[in-house]
Structures are given as C-alpha cells and as structure tokens.
Amino acid sequence: MTALVTERILVPGNKDIRQLFVIFFDDIRQKENLDVLVQQICQHFENAAVVAVCHYPVQANKPDSWEAKLLQHIALSEAELAQMVMQSDEQYLAYLNEKRQEFGLPVEATALIGVGYAASVVLELTKAEQVPAGRVITFGGRYVQLPESLSLEQTIHLLHADEDEKINIHFARDTHLHIDQIQGDATVDIANKTKNSLDPVLSKRMIERLLTCVPLRFWQEADSGEYELHPTGPEADDKIH
C-alpha cells in the first residue's frame, strides 16, 4: 500500500498566488536536490505556490511487489512500473485537482512535475482528454506505452540524466521523437555524465524552459493570425501556459 504524503507547501508572502507547481517524487533521499528545485522555482516565480508530495510506500504485503521495491529503493522492472502507473494515476490526478481547487487556479496556470518513477505516473496523465496542467515536467520518467495523441493544451518538458540508473536515457530521446511525430508539444534536455535526473543542472534547465519556451499552440495561432506574440517575451504576471 502506498500513500501521497505532502512534504511541504510554500506560498508567496504577499498571498498573491498566480501559479501552482505540484511536484511528485518517490525517493526521500532526493531531499537535497528537491530543495534546490523548490528554491529555484520560488526565486523565479515569486507569485507561485509550490507543493511537494512524496509517493511513499506505507507497507508492502509482498516482498517482490513494486511497493516493496519502491520502499527498498530497488529498480522496478517494466511490468512493475506499469503496475505502479496503473494503480497510481487516478490518485495523482485527484491530488492535483484538489490543490488546484484549494488555490483557485486553472489548468493553464499549473505546472505538474514528476521525479523518478513518479515521473512515469505524471506522464500517464498527459494522455487524458482533459489535460492535467499547462506545463508537464519530468525528471527521469518514461511512458509505459507511448501515447497515440496528445493535446496541444499542454507542453511537456523531458529532463534526463544520460546515466540515469532507473530509466534508460533512450526512453527520453524516443519519447521526444514520438511526440514530435504525433504533433504534440515537447522539449528534451539531457545532462551528460550525470546519474541523477534531478541534478541541479537539470533543475536550472527546467527554469530556462519555463521562462523562454513558447508553447507550440501559440506559434500555430500566431501563424493563423489568431494570436499576437509579445515581441519582448512574457510579462511579469503571465501565467505558466
């Protein structure tokens, strides 16, 4: 059995909350790098609320179950990862929606982040007809099964260490290529000679992507004359589209 345990909630001092970041992770040993990620978000998005939640195995009835392996920090097989995703996606979505309602923010002002195996659960949510967030960021995740289509109402940012010990780097490259082929919106960034996909260099890259990457749907709207791009970039109070 597993539970989603809220590790921290940070809100801006002025209570003027315009964006929401929800981070799902499954390895409490990542605390130091998680601290860096949260600090960078708070530094660059002063009006953002940040929620970090750990997917924590409460108990494992079977020693060879994915819950037991998650508890012992043992690598999951492809079948075990598929079980984790199938048994957890609705729980993740319910938690995310609860926090959006709590802060009164729409999907387009929400960034959903997944770390490690939790990132694979987060990726599963992107297949839904109603997108979970305007931005979806994964550190070291993979799809169990690649999507047939993806809504352009979300932009997916794949971040991966080239020597990631849980999820092989080829999944990040293959996923990015596939999303491009089905005309979805995604970016991929790979850290060389790095084993931890939550390395601070990738956290920094995530911030750069959020600040500079214009979602594909905006380019398409601009090309059709339906949307006018800001020539000087996003305004200070723009949402995380």
Image: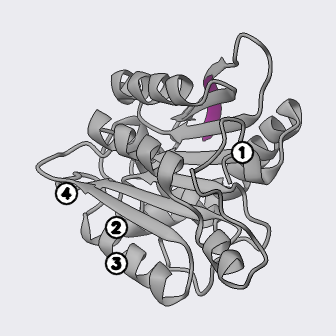
Relative to the observer, which residue lies in front, 215 or 230?
Answer: 230
Which residue position is annotated with label 2? 172
SS type, badge 3: helix
Which mark is in front, 1 or 4?
1
Residue 239 circle label: 1
Q: SS of the residue at dot 4?
A: loop
Task: Give the residue drawn at x 86%, y 31%.
Answer: 102
Q: Tags 1 and 3 in contact by the CB under 8 Å rule?
A: no
Q: What secondary structure predominates along the stretch shown in magenta?
A: strand
Q: CA distance from mark 2 to mark 1?
A: 27 Å
Q: Is residue 104 magenta?
A: no
2 vs 1, front mark: 1
**Residue 211: x, y in percent?**
51, 46
Q: Earlier in the sequence, mark 4 or mark 2?
A: 4
Left or right of residue 169, residue 204 in this image = right
The alpha-carbon separation of the residues under discs 3 and 2 comes to 6 Å
Of label 2 and label 1, which has the lower sequence position? 2
Pinpoint residue 199: horizontal percent, then vertical percent: 28, 37
Query: Of residues 79 and 36, which is closer to you in this image?
Result: 36
Question: Does the residue at mark 3 contact the one at mark 2 (Cβ under 8 Å)?
Answer: yes
The amino acid at mark 1 is Lys
What mark, if any, has residue 226 been given in the picture?
A: none
Does any portion of residue 151 appear in the rendered image?
no
Q: Which residue does the numbered mark 3 point to in the structure image?
A: 174
**Nearer-N-terminus badge (1/4):** 4
Mark 1 Cα-neighbour bin, 10 Å: few <14, some 14–19, many ≥20: some
User: Would residue 233 be seen by someone viewing this image from the given angle?
Assistant: yes
Residues rendered magenta in the picture:
1-7
Using the image, tell me which numbered label, if any, was put on residue 162: 4
Classify the position of the C terminus by image quarter.
bottom right
Q: Amino acid at mark 4?
A: Asp
